Image (cartoon, helix red, strand yellow):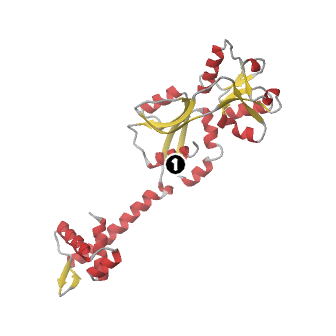
Amino acid sequence: MDLKKLETFIQVAEQGSFTKAAEKLGYTQSAVSFQIKQLEEALKTVLFERINHSIKLTPKGREILNLAHQMIALSADIEKAANDTNEISGTVRIAMADSLCHFIFWDHFSEFHRLYPNIKLKVISTSTEEMFRLAKQNDIDLVFTLDKHLYDTNYIIVKEHEINTSLITSAENELSLKEELSLDDISGEPLILTEKGMSYRQTFEEYAAKKSIELKPILETGDTELICHLVEQGAGISFLPDFVTEKYVKNGKIKQVRLSDFSAGIWIQILYHHDKWITPQMQCVMDYLCSFL
């Protein structure tokens, strides 16, 4: 049923005139007459009696007028429900790297929950390989990677960008005075690194291996906030994405130093399987995640 024709029908009935209805709707009189004719043909009934340039609803027309009002009101309710974020509900499962969790949720989750109180997030921290296995089996909805650039025609890239990585030292460490360091410069420093297999740690180790240097961390943990805290206290140095350490750098507690002749080639990417149905709650979460990239 064409709602525009029903709206025209309601206006003609309320105005008691094709001319007045046309003025109200911003149509020509002929357009209004044509819409009413089409509606009558579709319903196979006469809606108005036309006598001496006056119109009057037929009994069937009065009955249909009541139903038309109900349909227009119902249509408005449907649009309101679709646009009312408080009514969007459900669980969205996100696979992401540990390093991204603090960055995404630490300062902003409360605002997300305020906007979408009925959306529940389930975050699964795992390796990139496992993320795609879970996505393939439809055990997760979104993949949020921190790894080398990935392209697979089975997945839709929602958003992506390359990130910078740096060595970090305490502001009190003499190494912080340099703009760039080599592996030889840090050979005697205690290293605090993320767990083995983490994308940017792996590229760091591969770079060191090419220089015939073995990295021997004194602590390995997936908690990047803990790493930043320990580096700030002077317990050692580390190698992390700049977005993880940014707030510590801003308050002067640690210093980012570039590693000479090195590019990690690490990207943040948000993806989903091309066969995945995008639910309203999933779209809300994608928009929220994209706002940080």
Residue 2 placement, left or right of 270? left
Q: Is residue 151 above or below residue 74?
A: above
Snapshot quadrant of residue 2:
bottom left
Q: Identify which residue, 63 or 111, lies in the foreground.
A: 111
Q: Nearer the viewer, residue 122 or 48?
A: 48
Residue 231 makes an appearance in the image? yes
* Residue 143 x/y as whole percent: 50, 35
The image shows residue 161 at horizontal and vertical percentages of 55, 37
The quarter of the picture where the N terminus appears is bottom left
Q: Is residue 111 above or below residue 16?
A: above
Horizontal relation, residue 199 to residue 28: left or right: right
The residue that disc 1 covers is: 119
Query: Looking at the figure, which quarter contains the C terminus?
Result: top right
SS assignment at label 1 = strand
Q: Is residue 237 above or below residue 141?
A: above
Report the amino acid beneath label 1.
Answer: Ile
Residue 183 to residue 239: above or below:
above
Marks counted in the figure total 1
- As drawn, the residue found furthest toward the bottom would be 52
- Tag 1: Cα neighbours inside 10 Å, few (<14), some, or many (≥20)? many
Residue 233 lies in quadrant: top right
Q: Residue at x 35, y 77 (%)?
A: 24
**Residue under the image location 79 percent in, 30 percent down:** 176
Task: Name the residue: 54% across, 47% down.
Answer: 288
Whether residue 125 appears in this view of the structure is no
Q: Quadrant of residue 138?
A: top left
> Residue 77: x, y in percent?
40, 64
- As drawn, the residue found furthest toward the top would be 212
| Residue 180 picture location, percent across and down | 73, 27
